[in-house]
Image (cartoon, rainbow, N blue to C red):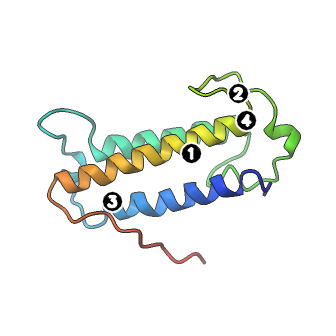
Amino acid sequence: MNRSVAPLAAILDLNTDLLLNCLDGLTDEEVRHRLAGGGNSLAFLIAHLTDTRHFLSSRLKHPLPNPLTPALTEEELSESTVHRFPMDDSTRLGMIAFLTQHDSYHVGQAAFLRRQIGRPAMTYTRTAKV
């Protein structure tokens, strides 16, 4: 893996564990619950993050589960993308960085929703990697 994306891949890996921790012990009803004031359910956030990760993977021309594992070269990372995100860096690396931040934002929303339905706070417990 290119060293430029290794920290971003680590964040996505952490976010996967955190999202699973947000869901730990919840019922299907709780996952589908929407707050009285509106907003998205946990089920929507999970679907959205899954879709976003597939989008990122397809833009990097690599299959899931981890689009950052293949050795992207500095040249590939500096190529411009056709998608514009709310940041100045329009390269592939900029796209990866923005979508990693986007992923973290939604994991935070999931943790908030977990607390709002009366469950204990999300933990930072990590799964053992085999």
* Spatial CA span between label 4 and label 2: 7 Å
What is the C-alpha distance between the residues marked 3 and 4? 29 Å
Between 60 and 86, the one lying in front of the other is 86
Name the residue: 11% across, 37% down: 36
Q: CA distance from mark 1 to mark 2?
A: 15 Å
Q: Are marks 1 and 2 in contact (CB under 8 Å)?
A: no
**Amino acid on which disc 1 is placed:** Thr
Q: Which residue is mark 3?
A: 22
Mark 4 = which residue? 92
Q: Which mark is in front, 3 or 2? A: 2
Label whose residue precedes the other's in the sequence (3 or 2): 3
Dot 3 and dot 2 residues touching (CB under 8 Å): no
Q: Amino acid at mark 4?
A: Arg
Quarter of the image with the C terminus is bottom right
**Image coords of residue 72 (percent x, y):** 81, 47
Would residue 87 be found to the left or right of residue 119 on screen?
Answer: right
Residue under label 1, please give it: 100
Mark 3 lies on a secondary structure that is: helix
Q: CA distance from mark 4 to mark 1?
A: 12 Å
Mark 3 is on which residue type? Cys
Check disc 2 and report the residue beneath it.
90
Question: Distance of mark 3 from mark 2, alpha carbons?
Answer: 32 Å
Residue 87 against residue 117 in the figure, above or below: above
Q: Residue at x 24, y 34 (%)?
A: 39
Please state which amino acid type lies under the numbered disc 2.
Ser
Does the residue at mark 4 contact the one at mark 1 (Cβ under 8 Å)? no
